[in-house]
Image: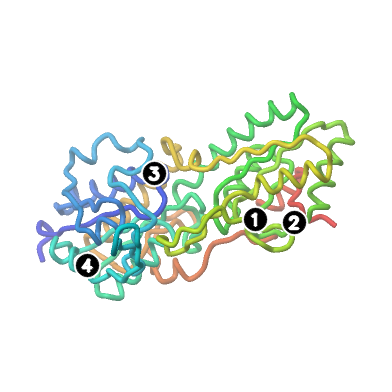
């Protein structure tokens, strides 16, 4: 098939994050300028693929979006074609396998390749489509930084910057009121945002899923600071950190999603327990979707562009069934199956953990 006839579909799946538009721009401009391809934007992630909602992206669509947060295509974390919510009757949702619709719409649109930009869930779906014979190329996107095949995902450091600024602001009010200030951040089952954000923002305690904490150690750290004349404490806690009994704090269950658990609320649990055990006034802030919004940092714009350019080349000339990845400073292709083999979580002896401990940060695990 001549390159002038090549039709490339691109979608953004899962949660939004800063840098998605930079990827769309990089994939699109690379394919347009270097290969003369046609770019088709699929709306709202895999929902748009199942429902057949898509439109052509011209050079005009790709102009002026590098610095924009979010995604011009829209996204969804409820569009898994193999786990798709269908309203069978008013108010009654049934989960169905609609993968045949996704494949049919790809074929009817004449798409030769699908570029899927997203995190672990998006890559799992892309891999399944690849098994059905669809040519797919992945781009790793997640503020959680939990894809094992790449050293970093774009959006991560933009989210960390928000955490850092938030801790800076909480520091001033905590010291003024002599309070314990607790900041709950995203990350799901990995503690990267809490760890990097806590380190950058000078948190006194960082609580993450990978390092179990005890009430005694957490409260001792807070009391110790008070005894030393430091009449406030900053705590950065990941939403997926487990309580001392090993249980997760789950805000809600959304069965429209492949992973129904919506984590959240551990900050409130910690705040009540710390105040009851220490008698120190404690306040809780939940950052939530503030971590996803806004413009990407310069670092994430560069990383997203590099990943998108690589994905654009792969889409137009192969290989397929791969994901663009950052390894040792270089952008390379790795098999999508390798990318989804396991989550990238924090080893207890990781250098960032060691650095945090060296400057006095507690992980709530001291005996």
Say whether disc 1 or disc 2 marks the residue closer to the N-terminus. 2
* Residue designated by label 1: 241
**Above/below status of 41 relative to 121:** above
From mark 3 to mark 2, how far is it between C-alphas? 34 Å
Q: Give the secondary structure at mark 2.
A: loop
- Asked where in the image residue 360 lies, by quadrant, the reply is top right
Mark 4 or 1, nearer chain start? 4
Q: Are marks 1 and 2 in contact (CB under 8 Å)?
A: yes
Select label 3 or label 4 by which is in front.
4
254 or 361, which lies in front?
254
Dot 4 surroundings within 10 Å: few (below 14), some, or many (20 or more)?
A: some
The percent coordinates of residue 236 (x first, y second) are 66, 44
Measured Cα–Cα span from mark 3 to mark 4: 29 Å
Camera-nearest label, 3 or 2 = 2
Crowdedness of circle 1 by 10 Å Cα count: few (<14), some, many (20+)? many
Position in image of residue 146 (x %, y %): 52, 58
Q: Which residue is mark 4?
A: 101
265 left or right, relative to 119:
right
Q: Disc 1 to disc 2, how far (Cα)?
A: 9 Å
In terms of secondary structure, where does tag 3 sit? loop
Reading the image, the residue beneath label 3 is 19
User: Taking 312 as reference, is 277 left or right?
Assistant: right
Q: Quadrant of residue 8?
A: bottom left
Q: Earlier in the sequence, mark 1 or mark 3?
A: 3
Query: Picture coordinates of residue 6 (x, y %)?
Result: 14, 59
Q: What label does residue 213 carry, if any?
A: 2
The answer to which of 128 and 269 lies nearer the viewer is: 269
Q: Name which residue lies at 59% across and 41% down.
A: 286
Distance between the Cα atoms at labels 4 and 1? 38 Å
């Amino acid at each position: 098939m001549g390159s002038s006839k090549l039709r490339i579909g691109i979608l953004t799946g899962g949660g939004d994050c800063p840098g998605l538009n930079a990827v769309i721009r990089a994939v699109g401009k690379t394919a347009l300028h270097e290969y003369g391809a046609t770019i088709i934007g699929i709306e709202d992630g895999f929902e748009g693929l199942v429902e057949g909602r898509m439109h052509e992206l011209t050079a005009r669509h790709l102009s002026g979006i590098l610095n924009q947060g979010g995604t011009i295509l829209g996204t969804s974390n409820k569009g898994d074609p193999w786990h798709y919510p269908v309203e069978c009757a008013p108010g009654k949702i049934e989960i169905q396998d609609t993968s045949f619709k996704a494949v049919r719409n790809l074929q009817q649109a004449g798409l030769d390749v699908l570029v899927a930009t997203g995190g672990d869930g998006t890559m799992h779906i892309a891999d399944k489509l690849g098994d059905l014979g669809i040519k797919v190329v992945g781009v790793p996107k997640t503020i959680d930084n939990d894809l094992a095949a790449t050293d970093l995902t774009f959006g991560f450091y933009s989210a960390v910057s928000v955490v850092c600024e938030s801790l800076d602001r909480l520091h001033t009010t905590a010291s003024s009121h002599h309070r314990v200030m607790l900041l709950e951040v995203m990350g799901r089952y990995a503690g990267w945002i809490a760890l990097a954000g806590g380190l950058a923002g000078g948190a006194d305690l960082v609580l993450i899923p990978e390092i179990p904490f005890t009430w005694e150690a957490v409260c001792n750290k807070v009391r110790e600071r008070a005894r030393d004349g430091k009449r406030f404490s900053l705590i950065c806690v990941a939403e997926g950190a487990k309580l001392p009994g090993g249980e997760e704090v789950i805000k809600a269950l959304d069965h429209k999603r492949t992973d129904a658990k919506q984590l959240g609320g551990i900050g409130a649990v910690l705040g009540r327990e710390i105040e009851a055990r220490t008698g120190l006034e404690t306040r809780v802030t939940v950052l939530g979707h503030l971590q996803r919004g806004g413009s990407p940092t310069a670092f994430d714009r560069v990383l997203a562009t590099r990943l998108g350019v690589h994905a654009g080349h792969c889409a137009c000339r192969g290989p397929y069934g791969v994901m663009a990845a950052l390894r040792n400073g270089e952008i390379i292709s790795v098999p999508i199956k390798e990318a989804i083999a396991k989550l990238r979580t924090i080893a207890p002896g990781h250098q960032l953990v060691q650095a945090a401990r060296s400057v006095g940060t507690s992980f709530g695990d001291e005996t």
